[in-house]
Amino acid sequence: MAKENSFDVVSEVNMQEVDNAYQQTRKEMAQRYDLKGSGSKIDFDKGKGVFTLSAPSEFVANQVIDVLNSKLIKRQIDIAAVKWSDPQSASGMTIRMYGTIIMGIDQDTCRKINKDIKNLKFKVKVTIEGDKLRVSSASRDTLQEVIAFLKEQDYGQPLQYVNYR
């Protein structure tokens, strides 16, 4: 009997690196002349994985998001892992935005990935295990082709391929 090879498709973010990027963003906001006295503020709840940004205008909010994105990119965090809400008006003529860190793959996306892999007609078995997928096959080459296919697709969130055995 052939030995089964497998890998897991997950969507994980290193929260410590996100927190470090947040701290660097706060320092840069205190030093940059265009953001220093603007009244913009960003907070990060590490437990929930949510950024709270308040700024006097949408333009300033986008500048702060750009600074945060640059810090995330430097720390090898995919910026697609942060989903920003639409600007909401808040007290004092300011706007508020929320950025949520995407952790795990939701069931609809799991089913879509599963369906896409099945449509390839490869000899692989896909099982959904909570917020991740396990893809197994007797052939390592087939698994490599599945990984290459998934890297070309866009599911609205970053995917990682771990536990390749």
Image: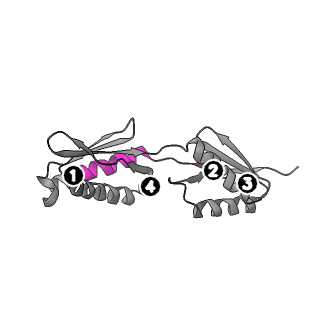
Could you tell me how far apart the alpha carbons at marks 4 and 2 are, in whole angstroms? 18 Å
First of labels 4, 1 by sequence position: 1
Q: Which residue is mark 2?
A: 112
First of labels 4, 2 by sequence position: 4
For the residue pair 68 and 106, the one nearer the viewer reads as 106
Q: Which residue is mark 1?
A: 27
Residue 118 is labelled as: 3
Q: Amino acid at mark 4?
A: Ala
Residue range (magenta): 10-26
Q: x and y percent of residue 16 in the render?
A: 39, 45
Residue 80 is labelled as: 4
First of labels 2, 3 by sequence position: 2
Q: x and y percent of residue 54 in the render?
A: 23, 45
First of labels 1, 3 by sequence position: 1
Dominant secondary-structure state across the stretch colored magenta: helix
Mark 4 or 2: the one toward you: 2
Could you tell me how far apart the alpha carbons at marks 1 and 3 are, in whole angstroms? 48 Å
First of labels 3, 4 by sequence position: 4
Q: Residues within 10 Å of mark 4 (few under 14, many from 20)?
A: few
Q: Amino acid at mark 2?
A: Lys
Query: Can residue 104 be seen from the camera position used here?
Result: yes
Mark 2 or 1: the one toward you: 2
Residue at far right of view: 1
> In the structure shown, which secondary structural element does the residue marked by tag 1 occupy?
helix
